[in-house]
Image: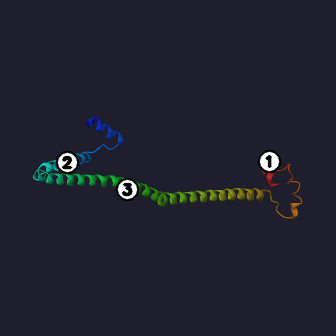
Amino acid sequence: MQWSYPDLRLRLIKTGLWPEGRMARLACYLAAMGAVLFALQKFLSLFAASWGDHLGGWVEFLAFLAVVLLSILAFRFLKRRVLWRLRNRLIVTYVFIGVIPAVLLVTMALITLYGLAGQFAVFVVTSEIHSQCAVWKPPTPRSATNWRHVWSAETIPPRNRWLA
């Protein structure tokens, strides 16, 4: 089976191993060039030991550059992964420290206002009852027997019958 560059590229793209950025491509090309020169150095040293020695500096230089670029790429990758986790943790911490207490305070304020509104409604109704009772109250306890016929259900207006 023959391998061609386009086939290799398509396979690497499908597996997600194809370098996408310029720095990643440069690091891969430098590593590949260093590997080719290393193989050429070993091959030439089979014929004569001095032939392969001249490529040793280039192999070390290309390997050093490839390692530096790949370490920068690895640092970026790890930083992106770690900071994503850290960002999620910070968001959750912010929600627990900043948002939930504010929501609890607003809820407590709304419950308090609801209770105060109920107390005000009770006050309004009680004052209305007292004002209505003051109108229908007999002037003295002795004359209460005289008012008994006034308090019958026929003489009380319909809106005040619940007082009788």
Q: Inspect the image, locate mark 3, and give the three-letter code of the amino acid beneath it.
A: Val
Where does label 1 land, which residue?
A: 158
Where does label 2 land, which residue?
A: 39
Q: Secondary structure at mark 2?
A: helix
Label 1: few (<14), some (14–19) or many (≥20) C-alpha neighbours in 10 Å: few
Q: Of label 2 and label 1, which has the lower sequence position? A: 2
Tell me whether the residue at label 2 lies in contact with that at label 3, contact meaning CB atoms closer than 8 angstroms. Answer: no
Q: Nearer the viewer, residue 73 or 15?
A: 15
Q: Nearer the viewer, residue 64 or 34?
A: 34
**Residue drawn at (42%, 58%), measured in percent from left and top?**
90
Q: Of label 2 and label 3, which has the lower sequence position? A: 2
Nearer the observer: mark 2 or 3; the answer is 2
Q: Nearer the viewer, residue 25 or 82?
A: 25
Q: Is residue 11 left or right of residue 108?
A: left
Q: Secondary structure at mark 1?
A: helix
Q: Inspect the image, locate mark 2, and give the three-letter code of the amino acid beneath it.
A: Ala
Give the number of the disc on residue 82: 3
Residue 151: image quadrant is bottom right
Decide: is 129 above or below 6.
Answer: below
Rounded to the nearest whole Å, what is the CA distance between mark 2 and mark 1? Answer: 111 Å
Rounded to the nearest whole Å, what is the CA distance between mark 2 and mark 3? Answer: 37 Å
**Residue drawn at (35%, 39%), measured in percent from left and top?**
14
Residue 148: image quadrant is bottom right
